[in-house]
């Protein structure tokens, strides 16, 4: 496994032939990341993983400085998983002095995470476009947990005619339903015990939908009520939206994305479930 820190090194190391799969990460890896690596290995001749805590997608007062980092641990996990290339640049390599370009994807970034975290998706779109240009993958792998991010990246790729196939893999969960996330490491034992309420809320939405409920607000209210039962949880948003446009629905008469963001103490967690459909995949 080669560990590369500069753009020049990454470009020189890229295999000259065959499919290359890229798994972009911010490090502090967990089984969800490794499931993406496993899928990439099954579908591509070689696999690259990027590890980069991207400063431009964090807003003022967010957790950039305390975001968990452990590069030696991550490298050990990736080597054991059979990864070929790891691109782990410093921020100054991605954003050198004088860097002044930003990519904004319209429409799908104005709601949900984009409404709560202004500028977040401009940071995501810019760094992902840079990674695609540097690594030049055939396919790039993302998790369904970050559903809006996947929608934004697909739009980015389509609008800019980038020659990358986007693969979205199912969310990996703990036995009690909590979606795996690097930020779960922030939770106290008491908060960790409360956190599965997020999945229970999403499951309540799915049960209502599968039982024939088509009033989107009734589905949202069931999600809110589940979270309200946990005194330490605060809702940022609860959504039942079109899975492609991310616009809120009044009637759930087609596949929909039930999603939410909640704050548990100082930790912010997101999750989602698709109603009436499965993860889009490719």
Image: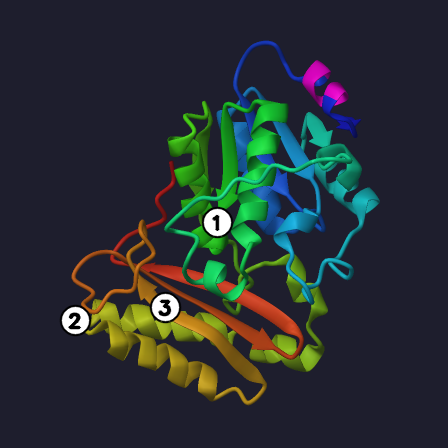
N-term mark: 1 or 3:
1
For residue 12, say whether it is visible: yes
Which callout, 2 or 3, points to the residue nearer the camera? 3
Give the residue at mark 3: 239
Q: Which residues are magenta?
A: 8-12
Q: Magenta segment: does it hold 13?
A: no
Mark 1, other Cα within 10 Å: few <14 / some 14–19 / many ≥20:
many
In contact (CB < 8 Å): disc 1 and disc 3: no
Quarter in which the N terminus is drawn: top right
Q: Is residue 71 left or right of residue 140?
A: right
Where, by quadrant of the figure, is residue 154 drawn?
A: top left
Give the residue at mark 2: 212
For residue 1, say whether it is visible: no
Q: Is residue 270 above or below residue 46?
A: below
Residue 78 location in percent, x, y? 71, 37
Q: Nearer the viewer, residue 33 or 56?
A: 56
Residue 66 location in percent, x, y? 77, 62
Mark 3, other Cα within 10 Å: few <14 / some 14–19 / many ≥20:
many
Q: Is residue 268 above or below residue 20?
A: below
Q: Nearer the viewer, residue 113 or 37?
A: 113
| Mark 1 and mark 2: Cα distance apart in space | 29 Å
In contact (CB < 8 Å): disc 1 and disc 2: no
Q: Residue at x 68, y 18 (%)?
A: 11
| Mark 2 and mark 3: Cα distance apart in space | 18 Å
N-term mark: 2 or 3:
2
Q: Is residue 93 above or below residue 227?
A: above
| Mark 1 and mark 3: Cα distance apart in space | 15 Å
């Amino acid at each position: 496994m080669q560990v590369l820190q500069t753009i020049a090194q990454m470009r020189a190391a890229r295999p000259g032939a065959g499919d290359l799969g890229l798994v972009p990460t911010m490090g502090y890896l967990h089984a969800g990341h490794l499931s993406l690596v496993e899928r990439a290995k099954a579908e591509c001749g070689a696999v690259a993983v990027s590890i980069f805590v991207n400063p431009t997608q964090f807003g003022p007062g967010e957790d950039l400085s305390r975001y968990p980092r452990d590069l030696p641990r991550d490298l050990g996990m990736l080597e054991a998983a059979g990864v070929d290339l790891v691109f782990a640049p410093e921020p100054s390599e991605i954003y050198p002095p004088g860097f002044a370009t930003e990519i904004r994807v319209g429409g799908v970034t104005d709601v949900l995470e984009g409404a709560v975290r202004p500028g977040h998706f401009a940071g995501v779109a810019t760094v992902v476009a840079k990674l695609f240009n540097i690594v030049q993958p055939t396919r790039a792998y993302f998790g369904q947990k970050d559903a809006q991010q996947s929608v934004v990246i697909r739009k980015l790729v389509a609008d800019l005619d980038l020659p990358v196939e986007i693969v979205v893999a199912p969310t990996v969960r703990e036995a009690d339903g909590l979606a795996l996330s690097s930020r779960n490491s922030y939770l106290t034992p008491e908060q960790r015990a409360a956190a599965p309420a997020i999945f229970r809320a999403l499951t309540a939405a799915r049960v209502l939908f599968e039982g024939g409920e088509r009033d989107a607000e009734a589905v949202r209210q069931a999600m809110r009520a589940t979270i309200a039962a946990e005194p330490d949880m605060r809702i940022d948003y609860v959504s039942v939206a079109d899975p492609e446009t991310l616009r809120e629905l009044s009637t759930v008469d087609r596949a929909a994305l039930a999603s939410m963001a909640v704050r548990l103490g100082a930790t912010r967690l997101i999750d989602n479930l698709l109603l009436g459909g499965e993860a889009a995949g490719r």
